[in-house]
Image: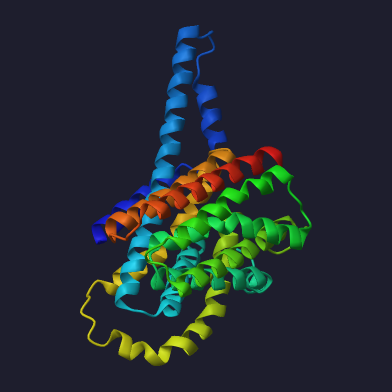
Amino acid sequence: MQRRTALLLAALSVASSIEAPRSRTTALRAAAAPKTNSLPAVAAGGALDAGLAKRLEVGAVFALWYALNVYYNVLNKKVLKVVKLPWLVATAQLAVGGLYSLGVWAAGLRAGPADLGAAVKAALPIAAAHGAGQAATVVSLGAGAVSSTHVIKALEPLFSAAVNAGVNGEVLPLGVYASLLPVIGGVGGAVATDLSFNPLSFAAAMASNLCFAFRAVCSKNAMRAPGSVLAALGAPSLFGVVTLGALLLVAPVALALELPGLSAAVAGVASPGLAASLACSGLFHYLNNEVMYLALARVHPVTLAVGNTLKRVVVILAALVVFQEPMNLATAVGTAVAIAGVLLYSVLKQKLA
């Protein structure tokens, strides 16, 4: 586990290093370039090399993004199989993410908020949605199959569209909404025929969809608000502030709900790597979002939407392989229809909205 963690962190370090300002590199190259006219063949070869390098760079970032997400889901499920305390697990994962953010800011690797207390206070509505969504997701993953949870979470665009229309009054073209029908039908068919269906897992996954929809809309509004404390932060630092706020809100609830049963839950548990797995799951969950921002900086939003859809497919397939989760043909077809609908919605939203 430690070796795999080290490899993933090393890969993240390489991906993050790509964020260095490119303008300086471009200027140095221009200064060092010969003043004579380059041959067309040389110019074409240079353009080809640059294009290949960019594709390899994007591929590496996407591969790291997928790996972090798969590792998070696998580790999270393994921890929940041993310790059936989803609220405390979610709290521990938020704590790891919060500590990571504080460490990055303290080391000067990223500009943090000038007044952390004021930033966290301003972000509390977003933090409440994020904390509740994270807790609900972990509850769903603990109660049911990982693949089932991610099929249900394919409905998140539906919730986002509804919340955005209700909060901001933004109405999308009819064709975009129509593309959600396959998602609804596919998820409905998959759930109806799911051999591992669990009512608690289903309800928690639906609740997480609603919470994350509010988180997305509120975050977007906060970043746009002129003069806002949060508007001055970049997206990664805003996520760090939101994570800290979510920790402050979720921790008391988790302690009240599950602390009394902690001793009984861990009694007799012979799993020396449990603490490390829990810490890694929290770190991978946070870094997954970090790498997503790296991906967004390099590709068109439509490409990112396609990548996010494929990521969900990868997670579902990984869960089926690692945990041997059952899935019959009808459920597989419903899942495929839902995933295809999400892809169609993402593309149409970027093209028509």
Q: Residue at x 51, y 50 (%)?
A: 338
In the picture provided, is 22 more to the left or to the right than 89?
right
Q: Which of these two is toward me, 91 or 334?
A: 334
Q: Position of residue 58 (x, y in %)?
A: 45, 38
Q: Report the front residue among 200 and 296.
A: 200
User: Does residue 320 sit above or below 350 in this rendering?
Assistant: below
Q: Position of residue 40 (x, y in %)?
A: 50, 7
176 left or right of 56? Answer: right
Residue 218 at what x, y percent from top left?
Answer: 68, 63
Q: Is residue 228 left or right of residue 328?
A: right
In the rendered image of this protein, does residue 28 appear above or below residue 93?
above
Judged from this view, the residue extending furthest toward the bottom is 260
Residue name at image x 62 percent, y 50 percent = 180
At a point 73% along the width and 55% down the height, the residue shown is 224
Is any part of residue 190 visible from this angle?
Answer: yes
Task: Determine which quarter of the picture holds residue 353.
Answer: top right
Quarter of the view holding residue 222: bottom right
Instruction: Please state which of residues 212 and 119 is positioned toward the viewer in this rendering.
Output: 212
Q: Quadrant of the N terminus?
A: bottom left
Residue 301 shows in this picture: no
> Splitting the image into 4 quarters, where does residue 282 fall?
bottom left
